[in-house]
Amino acid sequence: MSLGTHAENLFVSLLGKSEKEVNERIEKIWEHFFTPADLSCYEAGDEKSVYYEGPDGTAFILDTGNNDVRTEGMSYGMMICVQLDHREQFDKLWKWAKRYMTFSSDSAWDGYFCWQCKSDGTKIGGSNASDGELYFVTALFLASERWDEPHYSDEANKILAKVMNKNSIESGVYNLFDSDSRLVTFVPTRTGHGFTDPSYQLPAFIDKWARTATANRPFWKKAATAARQHLIASANSITGLYPDYSQFDGKAYAWPNATYDTSLYMYDAIRCPMNVGMDYYLCGKDRRNQETVMGHLLAFFKKDGFKHGHFSLDGSRAFGQYSCGMAGANAVGAITLAHSNVPEQRELAREYVKRLWDVQPPTGKFRYYEGLVYFLSMLHVSGHFSLDF
């Protein structure tokens, strides 16, 4: 596989699908999740869409399981829009995020986005969730290139300038990235800045910042390397499984403030193979290690029979159900094996790609998180995702 700005279309090269078939599938998934739903009846629950437009030229992505709006979903939605060239929806989402999720300029949180809001824009959470900023900033840089509009990149650079210049001693709000490890912090507060989340490691995004941001490019280059290394260090050496939260050295971390054991493979961790596969085809700077880790992880899920969704990192405790989000993210991880010299690994990659093709987009109350991870994964595996326009 030749590395470039896009992945190859694995549905075509591994499954023999036509480009037309794949493009039609992507369009149907867009219609599934982004056909505007009516704000006046969202509480009744549309069974497909997660995209809701308001009368004021804004729109939000609803977490249908929790009936709120999160930076995770808003930034994922913006990324999907810019990848598929839907500027109108991108602008509506960004307008909502700026209007309701940004903290005031006189707040210690200025530059960050409130991670959780009600659908009327009322802030619920008092802090950020750091993956949101990573997706927001990257989507804005890409929008600036795709639509030749400098104001998007200006906004991205303003965010980075603010979130990397916090007076933590007085305010209790820290920089988005830890200065020593150069890793993104879980939450830049006194209780959350000392560890991270493996699924927040997006080295391909940070590499983009190192080429595009107006400031701190040497730091971003080192931060991209640190994120890349963390995606290897935090994976179990036998199963390839990731914890939801981790220490900066990669060891699993059970955060006392959490409502569950965050040292397990649970919710956030399902995104890690997506991050690894994306970095593999877009950057190609740690291919051997990424092939090894993804080989372990994909072999583990196959051995489990694609039954379970939660595990101890050594695989000894299995519970929950394998999900469409996992099917998506794992198929992106399978990009690392698609052209392996080992026939068994190539066949393993083909199996994961086929499983993703066979998955239908989720409906019902809990379609939000699994559905957006699934959608992003479809873009990666189908060659519809780029970081250069």
Image (cartoon, rainbow, N blue to C red):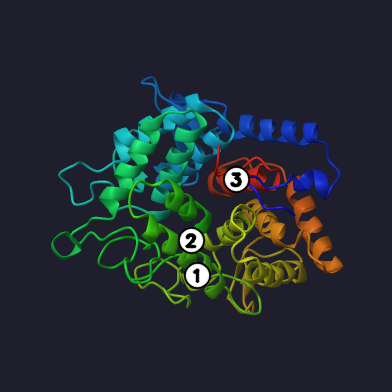
Are dots 1 and 2 in contact, CB under 8 Å? Answer: yes
Please give the label number shown on residue 230: 1
Are dots 1 and 3 in contact, CB under 8 Å? Answer: no
- The secondary structure type at the circle numbered 2 is loop
Measuring from the top left, give residue 329's x and y in whole percent.
63, 55
Of the 4 image quadrants, the one containing the N terminus is bottom right
Seen from the viewer's position, the closer of residues 222 and 280 is 222
Measuring from the top left, give residue 311's x and y in whole percent.
60, 72
Which is closer to the viewer, label 1 or label 3? 1
Which is closer to the viewer, label 3 or label 2? 2
Question: Relative to residue 1, is residue 38 drawn left or right?
Answer: left
Please give the label number shown on residue 201: 2
Seen from the viewer's position, the closer of residues 4 and 85 is 4
Calculate the distance from the C-alpha at mark 1 to the C-alpha at mark 3.
Answer: 22 Å
Figure check: 120 above or below 137 = above
Figure check: 54 above or below 317 = above
* Location of residue 293 by image quarter: bottom right
- The secondary structure type at the circle numbered 1 is helix
Figure check: 331 above or below 225 = above
Q: Residue at x 39, y 62 (%)?
A: 184
Please give the label number shown on residue 376: 3
* Location of residue 388 by image quarter: top right
